[in-house]
Image (cartoon, rainbow, N blue to C red):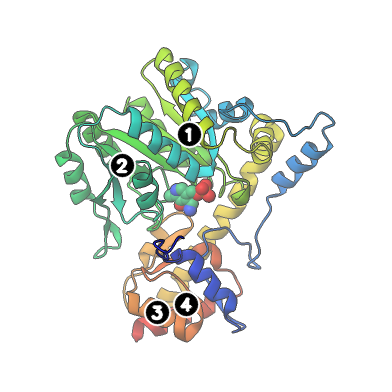
Amino acid sequence: RWTEVPLAPPDAIFKLTAAFKADTYPNKVNLGVGAYRDDNDKPWVLPVVKKATDILVKDPALDHEYLPITGLPEFTSAAARLIFGSDSPVIAEERVTSVQTISGTGANHLGALFLSRFYGWNDKRVYVSDPTWVNHHQIFPLAGIPVSTYPYYDPQTIGLAFGPFLETLKNAAPRSVFLLHACAHNPTGVDPTREQWGQIADVLLEKGHFAFFDCAYQGFASGDLDNDAWAVREFVRRNVPLLVCQSFAKNAGLYGERVGALHVVSPSKEAAVRIKSQLSVLARSEISNPPAHGARLVSLILNNSELFEEWKRDIRTMAGRIIDMRKELHRLLTEELKTPGNWDHIVNQIGMFSFTGISPAQSQALVEKAHIYLTANGRISMAGLNSHNIRYFAESLDKAVRG
Ligand code: PMP
């Protein structure tokens, strides 16, 4: 039995983490990690989350009953206001269907499953950026949607390959589906400018394409929740057909609690009701009902103005530390070490990840010679840098670049 089951390769990031853990070198650095770390390289429980947890556990009415299939209503409605803006007409007109999901991954999956069944396909495929979060390549085929890529990253400029990106949008069959990272593109840290987003929206509208927004870093990117929702809100304002996958893993530090939502925007309230009925059927067959704890925490934070203000401060703490690390790394490389090459992308990129532009061989040298763990594509997690290890990293990078 099971003799025909092949051994699957381990997940690259989890493999990297295992290698890091096994390394006994005292100054080892983990830049593969996709989670926020404080200046002492420790996971950070947001103070506002601690407060919300206290409130929650002291609630005498707290029980462990099932949530509704589509999730905690106070959570999903507040989550929709967070991404679309509380004054958004699509909320007032009840044109948004919001369903609680197993964090951002579950939102991507449910969104994919829904489109797979109900999208009026011309050409059944989803276009994702090259490169993208690796899991996109697994989630969509699992739901029966083949994946194609659109050019996104230009290694020459370590920036956006905007021309080729637009060309692909223009040449795709009408009504194609494009996955877009709402902010803080993973893995490159390269986002379109507002002007470029405008041009992307123009082509989407012209061709009748659908925008599948993946929003895993709202607030975490710039430190400002509204600023990071700009592209989504602009597309909504311009009536681009879309859905949004929303995760609270990063911005609330609730990675393991799996708090997220899928929001589908419809042309009418009546369509939103029908979509909700189908999403309920899909969610029922897969998870029956979503987990309660994390959604209750986020609901408390979003629906209480004092906690909400405190959350915004915590978000600024995280985003601010990451931005400081970018500035310091840039200063060390350009001013102190005078490392060959241009390093402006370090400060121009946004969010947790940065594409350094170094080669796979240089990345490998950092792992093997300096005990600095990063993925072969040269992506580093800024959250792995802190005041204690940044100089060591800059010096090691300098050596790797000089060869
Ligand atoms: N989308 C992107 C682009 C991500 O970077 C991530 C987190 N790595 C996710 C979705 C989903 O994460 P989670 O399921 O933990 O919310």
Examine the rendered structure and indicate whether residue 269 appears above or below residue 403. above
Residue identifier under label 1: 262
Which residue type does callout 3 highlight? Gln
Which of the image's four quarters has the C terminus?
Answer: bottom left
Residue identifier under label 2: 145
Q: Please rate how many residues cluster around mark 3, counting C-alpha atoms within 10 Å: few if below 14, some from 14 to 19, many from 20.
A: many
Counting residues from the start of the chain, the first of labels 1 and 4 encountered is 1
- Mark nearest the camera among 3 and 4 is 3
Which residue type does callout 4 highlight? Ala
Cα separation between marks 2 and 3: 34 Å
Q: What's the residue at 75%, 42% (across, down)?
A: 53
Cα separation between marks 2 and 4: 42 Å
Counting residues from the start of the chain, the first of labels 2 and 1 encountered is 2
Q: What's the residue at 54%, 62% (across, down)?
A: 383
- Mark nearest the camera among 2 and 1 is 2
Residue identifier under label 3: 364
Residue identifier under label 4: 394
Counting residues from the start of the chain, the first of labels 2 and 4 encountered is 2
Res 111 quadrant in image: top left
Residue 124, percent from left and from top: 24, 37
Examine the rendered structure and indicate whether residue 183 appears above or below residue 278. below
Examine the rendered structure and indicate whether residue 126 appears above or below residue 379. above
Counting residues from the start of the chain, the first of labels 3 and 4 encountered is 3
Pointer 2 residue Cβ closer than 8 Å to ligand 1: no
